[in-house]
Structure formats: C-alpha cells, structure tokens
Image: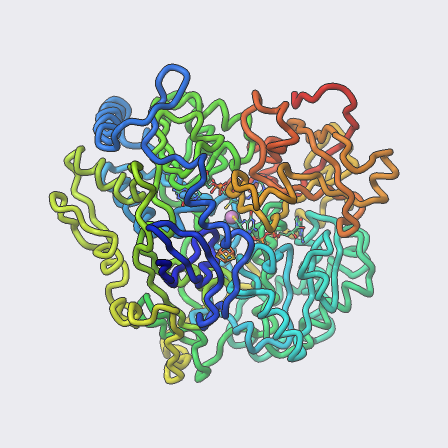
Amino acid sequence: MAEEHTAICRFCHSFCGIRVTVEGGRVNKVVGDKHNPMYHGYTCVKGRQLPQQHYNPERVLHTMKRQNDGHFAIAADQALDEMAEKLSAIIKKHGPRAVALYSATYSFPYPAGGLMAASFMSAIGSPMMFSSGSIDQPGKPVAIALHGRWDAGPQPFAEADTWMLVGANPVVSKWGGIPQYNPAKRLHDALQRGMKMVVIDPRVTECAEKAHVHVQCKPGEDPTILAGIINIIIHEDLYDADFVELETAGFGELKEIVTKFTPDYVARRADVPVEILLEAARTFAGGTKGMVTAGTGPNMAPRGTLMEYLVLVINTLCGRWMREGEAMPNPLALMPTWHGKAQPQPKPPAWGFGEKLRVRNLTNNAGGLTTAALADEILLEGEGQVKALFSVGGNPMAAWPDQLKTYEAMKALELNVALDIKMSATAKLCDYVVGTKLGLETPAVSQPNETIWGYGASTGFPEPYAMYQPTIVEPPKGSEVLEEWEVFYGLAQRMGLQLEFAGVLLDMVNKPTTDDLFELMCAGSRIPLAEVKKYPHGHIFTDDSIRVLPRDEDCEEKLDIGNEFMIGDLQQVVAEPVTSDAAYSDELSFSHRLVSRRLNDVYNSSGRDIPALTKNHRYNPAFMNPGDMQAAGLSHGDVVRIQSDHASILGIVEEAPDVRTGVISMAHAFGDAPEYDNQLMYIGSNTGRLTNVEKDYDPRIGMPRMSAIPVNLVRVDGPLSNQ
Ligand SMILES: Nc1nc2c(c(=O)[nH]1)N[C@H]1C(S)=C(S)[C@@H](COP(=O)(O)OP(=O)(O)OC[C@H]3O[C@@H](n4cnc5c(=O)[nH]c(N)nc54)[C@H](O)[C@@H]3O)O[C@H]1N2
Ligand SMILES: Nc1nc2c(c(=O)[nH]1)N[C@H]1C(S)=C(S)[C@@H](COP(=O)(O)OP(=O)(O)OC[C@H]3O[C@@H](n4cnc5c(=O)[nH]c(N)nc54)[C@H](O)[C@@H]3O)O[C@H]1N2
Ligand code: SF4
Ligand SMILES: [Mo]
C-alpha cells in the first residue's frame, strides 16, 4: 500500500512543500503539495528527482576510509574513533587552529549539523570556521555593516510597484531577489498588478525577458552603473528628501562623488545606451515601493562590497524601508518575534576584528573568514598551519576559487574529512568520507529560511511561514549513514568535550535526537514548534497586530550613505581607464569576460549523477553570442581553450543569443581534478581554475574576482587536454 506524506524538499535552499509517495519503505514519487500556502504546489525538475537522489547507485551509504589507492567502507563508530584520535594528536602538536571547518551548501538544509559543527569548533578552541558564504556574496553583510541595517527591514515584494535586480536570476536560482518560493509565479503576479522591473545583467535571463528595462551591460561595471543611477536620482530630484534628511548621514559626500558618474561616462564604460540608463533610474525611483537587490554575478565581479553598498544607498535614497506603524510583513515564526523599529541598528565592525589570517593581511569580517584564503592556510607552512579540514555538505574542489591551488591543499592535509552523499571531486581526495542521511530520512524544519531574512532585501520567507517534517523513510537497507550533527557530537564524546548547542549544555552521555535539537533551536520562537507540527502542509502564522515600532527616543543612529571607504573606492573607479581590464591585467589584453551563471537542472555540483538532470547538460557549455562565434570562426560544439591571466580551461561552445557580445557565460562547480580533464564531454570544466586568489581580490575581505573574468579564447582542434 502506498502512503502519502507531505515533506520539505531540501535539494535546494528554497524548501518547497512537496507530496511524497512511499511504498514498501521507499520513496517512489515526489510532486508539489498544492495545499502548501507558500509554494502552492510548485516543484522544479530537481525536487521531483528526490527518489533518484535517495536511491542513486553512486550514493555513499557508509563511512569510507581511504586505504592505499581506494576508499573502503568501515563502521562509523570505528571511523569516529580514528578521526578523534587523529584530531587529538593534531591539536596536541599544532594547536586547535590547525583544525578548520568548511560549512557549505548542504549545511543549510540540515541546520542542527551546522550548529553542532560550530559548537565542536568552539569546544576545541579553533576559530577557523569558514563557509561558502564568503565565496558567494560576502559583500552583502559587509556593505550592511558599513551602511547600517534598517531594523524594520525592507519593503515587501508583494506591495512593490518597482523592483530592480542586479545580476540575479531568482526565477532559476530561487535565491533571493524575488521571494524564492515559487518565484516565477510571484513575478508573474507582480507584473500583472503593474509592477515595473529593471534588470541589470549581461544576459537576457529569464527575469530580464520580463523586465521593463534591461540594462544589458558589460559585466564587472556594476559599481559604475549604480553610481550613475544614483547620480540621476539625485540630480533629477527623484529621491525621498525627508527620509534622507531624517535618517541618513553623508549625503553631501555621496552627491559630490556621484557627480563624476555622468550618464555619458557610465554609458561609455558599461557599454549601454544613455537612454536605457536614464530609463532604469527613472523607472525605479519613479515608483513608491520596492527594492533593488543584487545577486552573485556582480558580487563575484570586482568590488562586490561597493556594488552592494550602492544597492543599499539607492534603497535608502528612495526611502524603501518599512515605516512606523506598518504591519511587519514577516514577524517570524520559528524564531523569536521580530518587533522591527523604524530606525537603523548600531553598525557592527565590517572587518579588522577576530582571527587574523596568515595571508594577504586578512582578518575576520562581517562576511566571515575568507574561504578564498583557506587553501593558502593549508599550504603555508609555519605556526598555525591548517592540518585538518571538515567539509560539511561542501565541495572545495568544485567550488573554491583557484582549483589547482585547492587541489594541492586537499592533498597536503593530514586529516581531510567530507560529510557527503557521493564521492565528489573533494571526497575522492579525503581520508574519510562520512555518508550522510538525505532529506527524507531525517526530520526537517523551515527555520533556516527565517534566519536569512534581512541578509539582503527579499531573501527569506516573505510571510511568517513555517513547516516541520518528520522522518519519512529510513535510509536504504544495509546502509550506515549519519546525520551531520551526529559526527561532531560523536567526535566530542570521544574527545571528552562538553558541547554547548543553542546556548544549552548538552548531555554528552545520552545522545539527543534531531527533534530534541530542533526544540533547542526553536526555543523562544514566536510560534512553538509543537504548534507548527500541527500543520502538515505548512502554515502562514499571520499577525497583523505586529507593527513597526517608532524610533527609540535616544536612538542617534543614521544610515551612512557617504561611507569614507566606499567613497574612496568610487574615487578609485573614476581614476581607472574606461576599459578597466587594464587595471587588473597589465600584461595581456583580453577579448571576452567570463561570467558566472546558474543552470536550472543542477545545483552547484549536485545533481550531475542523476540521469534525468543531465539530459540538457552533462558538461557546462561555454555559452556565447552567435555574432562573437562567427567572428572567431567557431561553431556549436567546438572546443576552445579559455585563458585567463592565471590558468586555462577547455570549454565546449554553445550558441546563445541571450548572451551579450564580448561575454562567455559558464556555470561553475563542474569538472574535477586535472587527471580527469580528458573527460570534458562528461564532466565539463572548472571555471574556478581561472581565478587567481592572490590578485584582483577585495583587500579588506579577500573576495577574489570570480565573475567578469578577462579571458581570451582559441579553438582547440587536436586531442583534449586542459593544461
Ligand atoms: N567560479 C565560481 N565559483 C563559485 C561560484 C560561482 O558562481 N562561480 N559560486 C559560489 C557559491 S555562490 C557557492 S554557495 C559555492 C558552493 O560551494 P560548495 O557548497 O562547496 O559546493 P557544492 O557543489 O554545492 O557542494 C555541495 C556538496 O554537498 C554534497 N551534498 C549534496 N546533498 C547533500 C546532503 O544532503 N548532505 C550532505 N552532507 N552533502 C550533500 C554534494 O554532493 C556536494 O559535494 O561555490 C562558489 N564557487
Ligand atoms: N538551479 C540552480 N539554482 C541555484 C544554484 C544552482 O547551481 N542551480 N546555486 C545556488 C547558489 S549557491 C546561489 S548563491 C544562488 C545564486 O543565485 P543568483 O545570484 O540569482 O545566481 P544566477 O542565477 O547565477 O544569477 C547571477 C546573474 O548574474 C549575471 N552576472 C554575471 N556577472 C555579472 C556582472 O558582472 N554584472 C551583472 N550585472 N550581472 C552579472 C549572470 O548573467 C546571471 O544571470 O543560486 C542558488 N540556486
Ligand atoms: S526549487 Fe526545486 S530543488 Fe528547490 S526546493 Fe523546490 S523542488 Fe526542491
Ligand atoms: Mo551560493
């Protein structure tokens, strides 16, 4: 007899409400749950493959230990014993800083894992906690630290009459920009009600197709474009003068510097028509509600922090923050009530605090320790050298910038451990690979999507939605898979450490359950977890009485729209030659800029072992404008060598009229270690190799240039080799 359950899809961060059919203890079908009030039955092609993901023949169903040249399954208890022993020896000899944690993509859907790992790190006394956030959009939190966060948050998408996306494609990525919960429908509804959208992107993305104004710019020029838009907004008096007067500092400095970003200058530099630029500024600022939000593209291009800062400045100039007395769109549910106030929060430090890295004068910063420097920390000998690494739901070999350096680092570690579901490019180089439980094999809560609310305008649930999912199926028979948190709890037990989880000292003898941990994580939440559990389809816990509170009488905080560092950066931008490649790459001149992008069927390096998801792309095509291809004498399917000033990779060219002239659009997280390069047709190429982490990086936070990378290309006619 088949049973039906509702559940949370955890293939991606969107957490769609799904309906799962289970027969004989196995999941055999996933569809959208049309009774779910947040997603209304939506699923994507990835979510519908959860059965294939759970029963993938390639799945790691045990803990694997590397012995001689291969990996062999061993009992999890034995593996934890051995790991604990090695860790203790490393800490004894080199100190706790020698142990590093990399929490990445799949820490998010299993929040108890991330918390337990962090708790373990503090118990051993290591500050070396890194995450994928610092190779994603670290400029966001850093810019918020400089500009200030408006306590009551941004205006909601549901009420917006204008919206601007800067290098984000949420219809495909489901990651912010437009509430990422069935975003295509939300966008459709908003456009139907008359919302006007501006998109700044070198590609005619799924979002740009729907935009009223599309600024199809040269990539990497977003700070210039945004400064130009600010200039137009100020000089055409399109800003909210009262809000600026009351709530901000630095208007004079801002106005002075942006005067240099005249429409003509910006148009020349970003290679866009002046009229489009004027229309973009007027369309956005001409509305009354709605936000500018940026995605990964321009965050990975040079000066991501400045770009994010200018995004905040436009929102502030236009007064697009929640005002006193308005109903809080999302007062949260599985978190303590958010009583927003109509005032800026005190500004945290942006950089220059916490752990100092041993390279590039980097410190901790609001975006977290620099993952782009972790390979250096592993390779650089001397006191503090990192000797042990835990990758939790992450794949450094696929994702870290400068893959060849990462490769050396992965091989140099004394203890390299991955918590993963497959033998990823990284796992293959690990000493231990702990096979972990998958999304339908453990309880789930929607809380992670609440914790990101406020990270950028329009990330996180737009309304106080919450859902809980119990375990739906047991892992495959004969397997021994762990939850991420069990690994760190088990290590702590063996090493005699007391862990503190969500502010509570854990019982280190009687192991908690995942549900116990969820209770601790949700302590003090506006809606008790027990209440949320009553709603198997998820529920929106609306409370219109929760309104934005007035400014505290003694609050003297202002939003800083003339931050000295950011004004300084704008001065540097103006001082650059108009073709700014010269500022980065002095020796060579380059014909194209390679930009990052997401593909609908895969999630970073996940999904490429599921046949239904590789129908369109086994490899990551190098998408190019047909005109560029013709000019270079290239045809569809040709192999080209793509050369940055650091390294080269091979790409398989594909015609894409949506891609701007002078641009190559290529997805990341493909490919593998160099010895697999001849399998280009099956595994693609790693664009991360093109990045030099020691050059062209943000000197304050270490974010390297991972998009808008200057490259040249030449056709390769002979046998394939990536060297
Ligand atoms: N050049 C370039 N580089 C980039 C980017 C780019 O656009 N361009 N994007 C950057 C961004 S935004 C990010 S976030 C990072 C991503 O960086 P990572 O998170 O390090 O990369 P992923 O490929 O997502 O790695 C996820 C790993 O988790 C495993 N996994 C899948 N499901 C589960 C599960 O249920 N449990 C566990 N434990 N593991 C699971 C997968 O097999 C995979 O090995 O990459 C960054 N790197
Ligand atoms: N299907 C799918 N969904 C995903 C992922 C995936 O791999 N697949 N990855 C997930 C992850 S880890 C993240 S962080 C999010 C990211 O979510 P998004 O930030 O929305 O990512 P993208 O869809 O790559 O959109 C980035 C856009 O930036 C544009 N771009 C590139 N360079 C520049 C530039 O210099 N300037 C401007 N203006 N635009 C530029 C690209 O053309 C692209 O359209 O997506 C998540 N969702
Ligand atoms: S968008 Fe797709 S992969 Fe992401 S949660 Fe929804 S169904 Fe799952
Ligand atoms: Mo990401």
Q: In this view, does 716 lie to the left or right of 11?
A: right
Q: In this view, does 602 lie to the left or right of 714?
A: left
The image shows residue 326, relative to residue 455, as above or below, that is below
Locate residue 72: give its quadrant: top left
The image shows residue 91, relative to residue 706, as above or below, that is above
Q: Position of residue 665 (x, y in %)?
A: 69, 44
Quadrant containing the C terminus is top right
Locate residue 542: give its quadrant: bottom left
Furthest residue toward front: 1
Q: Where is residue 492 in the image (x, y as percent from the top left)?
A: 20, 38
The residue sitting at 30% across, 51% down in the picture is 112
Furthest residue toward top: 68
Q: In this view, does 622 lie to the left or right of 40?
A: right
The residue sitting at 21% across, 51% down in the picture is 513
Locate residue 634: give its quadrant: top right
Quadrant containing the N terminus is bottom left
The chosen color scheme is: rainbow
Tally the marks. Answer: 0
Q: Can residue 695 be seen in this view?
A: no
Q: In this view, does 16 lie to the left or right of 278?
A: left
The image shows residue 495, relative to residue 626, as above or below, that is above
Q: Nearer the viewer, residue 562 or 478?
A: 478
Q: Where is residue 181 in the image (x, y as percent from the top left)?
A: 51, 64
Q: Is residue 521 visible?
A: yes
Q: Where is residue 515 in the image (x, y as percent from the top left)?
A: 24, 56
